[in-house]
Each structure stands twice: as C-alpha cells, then as structure tokens.
Amino acid sequence: MVKHPTQLLIAAALLAVGLIPATAQQSRIERVKSFTENGITVILSPAENKLISVIVALEGGLASGETTNPVLSDFTADLITSSGSKQTPKEELRKFLARTSTSISGEGDQRGMRFSMTATRPNFGKAWNLLAEVITQPAFDPTAYSTTLAARLARERRRNTNPEGYAGRLADSLLTLGHPVLGRATELKDIQAVSVPMMEGFQKQLAERSRMTIVVVGNVSQGELRMKLRALQSLPLGSYKPPTMPTLAPSAAPKVLVRDRPGSPTTYVSAGFVGPAITSPDYWPLAIGLAHLRNVLFEEVRTKRNLSYAPGSGLRSELGIGMGYMSVSAVYPDSAIEIMNRELEKMRRGEFTEEDLNDSRQVYITGYFMRQMTNGGVAEALLAAQQNSGNWKTAFSYDAIQQVNKASVQAAFQKYARNLQVGIVGPKSAVTEKKYLVGS
C-alpha cells in the first residue's frame, strides 16, 4: 500500500537519526519528576535546549458544575493574559514579551483554564514573575474586555461560514447529544452573557492551589522551581477534587444531518462514532487502525479515483473520551462515501495485512514523537495525560503503541466503528442520505 510521500520522508528521516529508540519510553519517564509543593501538583521534565515552557492549569468550570456557560473558562483566561496584572500594565507586559521573544497566553475548556508561557533561559525569572502576577493579581482591563468580546462575537457569527468545520460540528452535535459536558456547545448568547464581574468571580473561585497543576519543561532544577512556586503561595489552598467525567454513550443508530447549500461546488462530509476512553486498552489499537485507514482512503479515494483531495480518518480525544471520525470533501460525495464505507467495513472484517498495519504504525509513531519534539509539545502532552488519565506517564505510550497488532485493531473496529453520526454541508441534491447510514 502506498503511503503519503511526506509521511514516508519524515519517518525515514527520524528513524535514520535514531529519534525512535526502543528504550524511548522508559528513559523519558525516568527523567521526569513529579511532586507536590504547597498543595500544587508539579510535573518537571528536563530539556537541554535554551527554551523553557510552562503550563499552569486551574481546574473548575462546566465539567465541575461550577458554571453553565461553556465559554466562560476560555474567555476569562484569554482576557487575563491580555490585560496584564495590577502590578504590570498590559502595555508594559506587551513590551517585555516583544523585546524578549517571550509568549504568555491563556485558554480554557470545559475542565478549566490554562496559562502557557515559553521563555528563553535568561528571561525565565522575569517571565515567571509576570505569569504569576497575571494569575494571582489579574487586572481585567475593560478596554481589552471590549476588544476581546467584539472579536469573539464576530467569530461566532461567522462560525458556520466554513463548510468543513460546520460539517464537523454537525456530526459532533449528534455524537455528543445528551452529554452534560461535551453536549453543551457555545452559542452567541453565552458570549454575550459574560461580563467582567462574572469573570472576576470565576477567576477567584478557580485560583486555589488544590486546583493547580503546573508543568515545566526546560533547563530548570527542582530546587529552583520550588523557589519559583513561592510566587503562588498567596493563593488559598482550597479542597478541590476533580469530578468523574461522565462517559459518552455509543449512538444507538446511525444518523445524518444535512445543511443544504445549493450553490456550493463541493460537499463536505464528517462522520463520527464514540470510541474508547484514553485509558482503555482499545484506545491505541483504534488510533493506529484509523491512521492505517487514512492511508488506505488516500490511496483509494484520491490517488486511484481523484474524488477528493484530502479524505481522512482518525481518533481524537475530548476530555479523555475518544471519538473516531472519517471526513471527505468531494464534488461527488455519494461516490466517495461508498468507497470509504467499504474500506471501513474491510477494517472490521480484518481485510488488511499485519505488514501494512506495521508500516502505518511506524508512521504514526513518527508523528507521535514529532508532536513531542518541542518543549511546548511535551508540556501539552504531560498535562493532557495527567488530566485525562490521572497519570502523566501515559504521555509516553510508545510501548503500548508498539504492541498494537492486527487482532487488536480488528477487535476495536468491530466494537466501536458503527452507527456513524454524519454531518453534511453542501448541495442536498448531491446527497443520497441512505448511503451515509452505516450501522453495526
């Protein structure tokens, strides 16, 4: 089976320089230190380059039942890092960031807020102090609020103008329907409801050390980091306990949701199904299997028949819950989806070789390691693993990926790849809905 040439070149290059050693997982785990300091969970991963990446996560929000507004966490974190602090005005903060090539940003999701920073080693001390200031003494600048609010409202109003993204959201809305956390999508009224007093109260509620996980990747000693953490000791300890994330029930039957755009020359299709939790032994077999399917779809749909430029499939994780997907954009969507559904069924029947699967697994491992080649990538992986599985060590799952075989992949497809929930954006006249209804 022919692989995407770019994937093959990347894989060959990394393998040639030895970036995927057999002992990769254990050696990386041994280098990471995890400890608790004044109630704060800390994960420290050494790196010998000149950059230091930091993520400070504060848990709480929609998933914890502390707000019903799905945009509050992200809006608040964004405004905090745009406003400076009570000690350092936003203009002074921006000048420092520009002068020193430092980045400080904030974002949030249903689980809480995250503040990220990347700085060079010489600027780390000052950058850390500024990051600590915006977390402990946020300014909530009214001008920054107005600017951010206007940008978010404009972005929400034009959100469905991108047909590819719209198709994905339609599929997700079917897939997560009824889930108390994932099923709560942001609406225009949610953004309009957020005020500065609301954000100030939310920040005060989350600014507790028991809610805080800090990941640091770079040339920082444990002793130095413990000293730095004193800048956060003014925050109350609190007694936060992370909630148990509700599971996402598999869809009982396939469904299709079409949004008619008669003038569009292309139809966009996104199909999803509920997958395993990231802690499940089925997670990596399904991830590798869908990566293999993506290579097959590239060959069958694009290379052989030129029906689509970029058909795809994969497994993503939302708050630790796996969701499989297939996607395609095509002038003749019925023809493309027939081929894709056929290849999906072949995966369920085990009509693929161990050799081809191994090739796809090695390309997947290459991408897996590439995502962790930067300090920021490692920090993101460590935090996601800690929050989604309760164990940062799962960020280094090389051994588990290597153990995936044909039998485990076929079993995962038989168990999960069914009852697809399909979102379609394009001319309704080009769509025969029954062709998209893939059941058990």
Image (tube, rainbow, N blue to C red):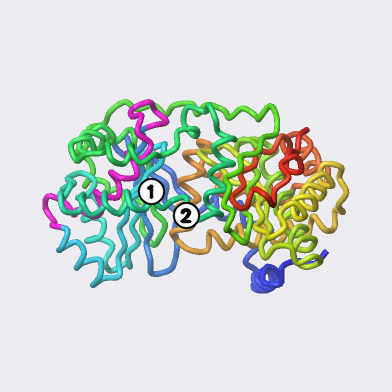
At label 2, the amino acid type is Thr
Q: Position of residue 70 (x, y in %)?
A: 38, 36
Q: Nearer the viewer, residue 21 or 365?
A: 365
Q: Which mark is residue 228?
A: none
Q: Which mark is residue 156?
A: 1
Which of the image's four quarters has the C terminus? Answer: top right
Which of the image's four quarters has the N terminus? Answer: bottom right
Q: Secondary structure at mark 2?
A: helix
Q: Residue at x 13, y 56 (%)?
A: 88
Q: Earlier in the sequence, mark 1 or mark 2?
A: 1
State the extent of the magenta-drawn residues as a range: 62-89
Label 2 near label 1: C-beta < 8 Å?
A: no
Q: Position of residue 360 (x, y in %)?
A: 75, 58
Alpha carbon separation for disc pair 1 and 2: 10 Å
Q: Residue at x 80, y 55 (%)?
A: 357
Residue 330 lies in magenta, yes or no? no
Query: Quick check: 219 left or right of 147?
Result: right
Q: Position of residue 280 (x, y in %)?
A: 65, 35
Q: Secondary structure at mark 1?
A: helix
Please say if 375 is above or below 86.
Answer: below
